Amino acid sequence: MTKLNIMASRHSAFYSPMICTIAGGFLEKEGLSGEYHVVEAGSTSGGAVAEGRMDVAQAAVSASWSPLDKGTRPAFAHFAQINRYDGFFIAAREPDTDFSWNKLLNGKFLYVHGGQPEAMLRYGAFKQGLDLSDVDDIPSPGDPK
């Protein structure tokens, strides 16, 4: 059975399809096995693939933005679409049947900073009349400095 080293940038709901593929036995049905890895501090999933340390990684398209902004070609290629929509989840400690986006202004909010995740969250907030810059945010591990 061929083993694939598969990497995620962080533990996140964004990576659910990949985690389910590994844990659900789908790879074994194809004669493959998967070993799940999370990127180490100071590294990137795309870099690990480009360097041959990983066989495949799930990454947001924004992982290609930095090299493209510098006029260089990314060292890896996005080759498959995982989902049709870029999304995010907003979760709270307690259920809130009367949620509104303005409630994010009343407490601290933990979200992924940088790249596509933040861009999509900012857009969603903007569409709801909220400027994400007005929210008291909490940096998460792995956020860009």
Image (tube, rainbow, N blue to C red):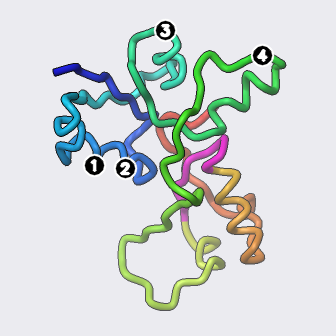
The amino acid sitting under disc 2 is Pro
Residue at the disc numbered 3: 51
Task: Return the disc, 3 or 2, that comes first in the chain's sequence.
Answer: 2
Task: Return the disc, 2 or 4, that comes first in the chain's sequence.
Answer: 2
Q: CA distance from mark 4 to mark 3?
A: 17 Å
- Residue at the spot x=78%, y=16% of the render? 72
Task: Return the disc, 4 or 3, that comes first in the chain's sequence.
Answer: 3
As drawn, is 67 to the left or to the right of 4? Answer: right
Contact flag, marks 1 and 2 (Cβ < 8 Å) = yes
The amino acid sitting under disc 3 is Glu
Residue at the disc numbered 1: 20
Contact flag, marks 4 and 3 (Cβ < 8 Å) = no
Please tell me which residue lies in front, 130 or 17: 17
Please provide percent x and percent y for residue 107. Answer: 55, 69
Contact flag, marks 3 and 2 (Cβ < 8 Å) = no
Residue at the disc numbered 2: 17
Residue range highlighted in magenta: 108-117
The amino acid sitting under disc 1 is Cys
Judging from the image, what secondary structure is the residue with disc 2 in?
A: helix
Alpha-carbon neighbours of circle 3 within 10 Å: few (<14), some, or many (≥20)? few
Judging from the image, what secondary structure is the residue with disc 3 in?
A: loop
